[in-house]
């Protein structure tokens, strides 16, 4: 069975501080995708990243960066120099790559990020 | 880019009535779509997998007679909440995958259902 754990329920930071969101996953599959989504108060899911289990390279996109460590089953997300617009709930998710299951996401509980001016 | 349109974005209905939510892929074919439910301050939970031309596959604990899913074409899946009750009030969101291996996933903007 798959499981995604986001242990941090809420993180509050002051603008310009860095914030790191933890994600630990469990799966029996050898190939899978990991995702991060942002959910602002309006509710829609904003796609941030998709990472294949074969690709352990860290990635940076603007103020966002991701650290994927297969050895510890973690896929952590860092926002550098946070801004008020970063306030949202962030979800980590997992999907295996079998034909029938691809796209079926197992979401973590989510982490509420609050950035104050 | 590919877009999934979900309607309505908000709906309020009276207890005992039925509500239909549409999820439409606008510029790609989606043999498979997924329906999720999100209660306030909780995560998204998969309700069912919608397959074009066949019966939906429901997750454990989801009542298939209450949440009717129809995927009659390659671009449209509908979720009907039948005999809605206040406890069905939730945020419902669909996603669609393109019909090619490891294709992107596309989410609709969600439907906020309030049952009074």
Image (cartoon, rainbow, N blue to C red):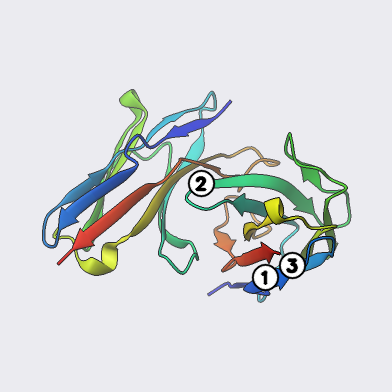
Q: Position of residue A63 (x, y in %)?
A: 20, 61
Q: Are marks 2 and 1 on the same chain?
A: yes
User: Label 3: how many residues lie within 10 Å, few (<14), some (14-19) or many (20+)?
Assistant: many
| Residue A99 visible in this rendered orientation of the protein | yes
Q: Residue at x 77, y 63 (%)?
A: B77
Quadrant in which the N terminus of chain A appears: top right
Outermost left residue: A16
Query: For mark 3, what is the residue?
Result: B21
Mark positioned earlier in the residue sequence (1 or 3): 3
What SS does tag 1 mark? Answer: loop
Label 1 – label 3 distance at C-alpha: 19 Å
User: Residue A40's spot in the image, x, y percent?
Assistant: 40, 64
Label 1 resides on the chain identified as B
Quarter location, residue B52: bottom right
Disc 2: CA contacts within 10 A as few (<14), some (14-19) or many (>=20): some
Label 1 and label 3 in one chain: yes
Where does label 2 land, which residue? B43
Quadrant occupied by the C terminus of chain A: bottom left
Image mark 2: chain:
B
């Amino acid at each position: 069975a798959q499981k995604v754990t986001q242990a941090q329920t809420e993180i509050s930071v002051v603008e310009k501080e860095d914030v790191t969101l933890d994600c630990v996953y469990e799966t029996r599959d050898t190939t899978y995708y990991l995702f991060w989504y942002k959910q602002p108060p309006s509710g829609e899911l904003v796609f941030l990243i998709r990472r294949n289990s074969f690709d352990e390279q860290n990635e940076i996109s603007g103020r966002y960066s991701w650290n994927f460590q297969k050895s510890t089953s973690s896929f952590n997300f860092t926002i550098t120099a946070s801004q008020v617009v970063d306030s949202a709930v962030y979800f980590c998710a997992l999907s295996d790559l079998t034909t029938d299951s691809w796209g079926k996401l197992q979401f973590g509980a989510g982490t509420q990020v609050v950035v104050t001016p | 880019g590919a877009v999934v349109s979900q309607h309505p974005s908000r709906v309020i209905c009276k207890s005992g009535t039925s509500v239909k939510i549409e999820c439409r892929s606008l510029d790609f074919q989606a043999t498979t779509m997924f329906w999720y439910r999100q209660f306030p301050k909780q995560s998204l939970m998969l309700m069912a997998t919608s397959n074009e031309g066949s019966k939906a596959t429901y997750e454990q604990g989801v009542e298939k007679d209450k949440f009717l899913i129809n995927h009659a074409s390659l671009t449209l899946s509908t979720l009907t909440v039948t005999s809605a009750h206040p406890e069905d009030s939730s945020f419902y969101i669909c996603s669609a995958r393109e019909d090619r291996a490891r294709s992107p996933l596309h989410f609709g903007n969600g439907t906020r259902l309030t049952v009074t």
